[in-house]
Image: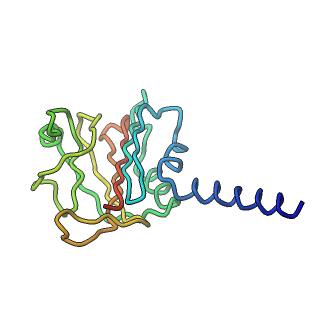
Amino acid sequence: MKNTLFTTALLLMLCISCNSISPRNYWENFDSINLKEAHSDTGPRGGMLEMYWRASAKNHFKAIDIIKYATEGGWILADRIPIAKSHLQTWRTKSGKPGFAFTYTNSFTDLTNIPFTRWTNNDVTVYRFKTNFIALLPDDAGETNKNGYVVLSRDGKELSVYYLWGE
């Protein structure tokens, strides 16, 4: 009986801890009705997450609510930058598809690697967050914990989350 109780308690703790550290599980709870796409890939050395929400009403997604939700999940707002539609639409993946220019720099002008899908084609504000996981910079240039991004369309109808951690 003691072994069964111990095993059950251990499994429950593992399930709870796995759910609490999984970014996808956390973000899937944000306005799940309007969640349109979610892609993630995790492994022993790191992972990635990209998610997209779309609502029919203008101003459905508000920066104050998104920042509060991210903060409750352990993310800390580092900065924000508006990106014009004309600039955003130049971001393409290597295969030519619309991409999100996940960047470790303080600007979005020196782009060489565009690994993420971009669904939004409007003026946006990109919110960059410090997270509780680090990302190793390319070419052994160090590490950063500014690796969580929230992209909010100006009209408040579209929202994307991008997260990259590990190697």
- Compared to 140, does 107 lie above or below? above
For this rendering, which residue is in front, 60 or 108? 108
Residue situated in front as seen by the camera: 160 or 40: 40
Colouring scheme, one of rainbow, by chain, secondary structure, one colour: rainbow
Q: Which residue lies most toward the top here? A: 56
47 relative position to 143: left or right: right
Query: Would residue 120 be found to the left or right of residue 41 on screen?
Result: left
- Where residue 29 appears, as percent x and y from the top left, is 55, 44
Q: Position of residue 161 (x, y in %)?
A: 37, 47
**In which image quadrant can residue 154 be found?**
top left
Place residue 120 in its image quadrant. Answer: top left
Residue 56: give x, y in percent of width and height: 42, 27
Q: Residue at x 38, y 60 (%)?
A: 45
Farthest residue in the bottom direction?
Answer: 142
Image mark count: 0
Above or below: residue 72 compared with residue 94: below
Which residue is more in the foreground, 8 or 81? 8
Q: Is residue 88 left or right of residue 20?
A: left
Quarter occupied by the C terminus: bottom left
Task: Identify the residue at horizontal 23%, vertical 34% (top origin).
Answer: 121
Q: Is residue 110 left or right of residue 15?
A: left
Position of residue 137 relative to residue 59, above or below, is below
What residue sits 23% from the left and 45% below the top? 115
Q: Quadrant of the N terminus?
A: bottom right
* Residue 72, image x, y percentages: 53, 60
